[in-house]
Image (cartoon, rainbow, N blue to C red):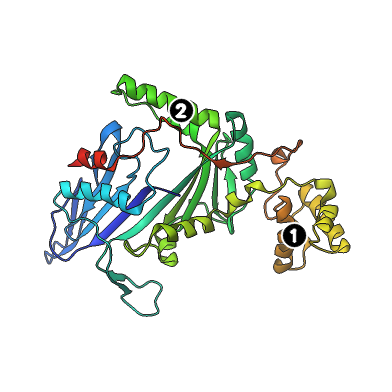
Amino acid sequence: MRLPQLALDVDVCRPLPRVGQFGRSLIDLDSGDLISDTVTSRKVQGSYHTSIQIRCDGSTVQVTGNPSKFGRLDNLFGYRRIDDCVAVFNAVLTRFDLPPFTKATYYRPSQQDSARARMITDGALFTQFDLTQNHACGSSSLVLPALRALSTNTGGRKIPHLFANGRTVEWIYENSRSKGSTYLYSKGYDKAFEMELHPVPYDLTEEDRHYLERLKHFVKSQGCIREEHSLKSKFLKRAGTYVYGIVDEKRLDAQFEKVRDMWNKATASVADYQNVGSQLVAMNACSEAMAAKMQNLVYAWISGVDVRSQTPSKATFYRYRDLLLPLGLDIKLKFDVTRMNTKIRTIELRPLAVPDFYRHADLSDQIRQVA
């Protein structure tokens, strides 16, 4: 698990300096009453043209950004501890005479038995976690086939969408056009391609430039696929992982495993479409009569038939789907002939090893940059 990006906010009792880029006040001209008073975020620059967003309207402090990236040339491998990420943010707050984010000693909802109740706590609240993991599929030539294979895996109610260039697959909720909205957004992408998209800072030293090129070559040669999950505010509240001091790495690890079921299916066998029935019987998954029925259902699915219309109920459809998922077939998705395997090939995703030349995040160095 990685923690490359966080968003934190906290309410405080004492008046604080207003910090931001712009301020906007709305006043009732008849009464002279102040209706609203808002402050937009201010960008705090770090080395290598990196930045973090900070905002304080006088009572609420908010910081958003990527602590694993701030002040660093890359963020291939970032912090694993929440406290390290928060320490980077706190260094920025100190620079603007704002109080640091602290862990909660108590927390409770403002209303009993209400899912929408505001949390009363003396600690900071997380509004987003971005959790990542790097995978190696062996070579750059295997990245696109691996992403194409991943794009056939659903994740709960999330359905996959493969980008036109084939280098990114995202999972969004069915009947939703948004990227998870305020709940959850997941994706996987070709990391080497993504690194090439970002321009190299013009003021790099020769040593830095050589390091970056060496790192890009390593990522490409390993066939690196980056897995990312953005756990947003509604998700964190429902999971109970949004109060700083209450959430820890073990609880986040557990949530990480829950949201990455589409990746856990990455090692599923590629089905032989002609022998689905015999495979089900060999697995003792169902009777021979049901296996024959599943074989006909798969033929209909491949032919472009809406197989939902071939089942008597929604519950029956999902029971059939559960039978076929272990074979790498998801009849919930429309069959795409371009993703059909004409030759069976196994692509094993394994954790990307850290190269011996890698520059790990240095917390003390990052803090010095904003001191």
Name the residue beneath numbered marker 2: 216
Q: Residue at x 33, y 22 (%)?
A: 207
Q: Residue at x 38, y 21 (%)?
A: 210
* Residue 15 in sight here: yes
In the rendered image, which quarter contains the C terminus? top left
Q: Residue at x 73, y 68 (%)?
A: 313
Residue 340 at what x, y percent from top left? 73, 40
* Residue 40 in sight here: no
Are discs 2 and 1 less than 8 Å apart at CB? no
| Circle nearer the N terminus (2, 1) | 2
- For label 2, the SS is helix
Number of residue marks? 2
- Mark-to-mark CA distance, 2 and 1: 42 Å
Q: What kind of residue is marked 1?
A: Leu
Residue 266 at what x, y percent from top left? 63, 47
State which quadrant residue 141 falls in: top right
Name the residue beneath numbered marker 1: 323
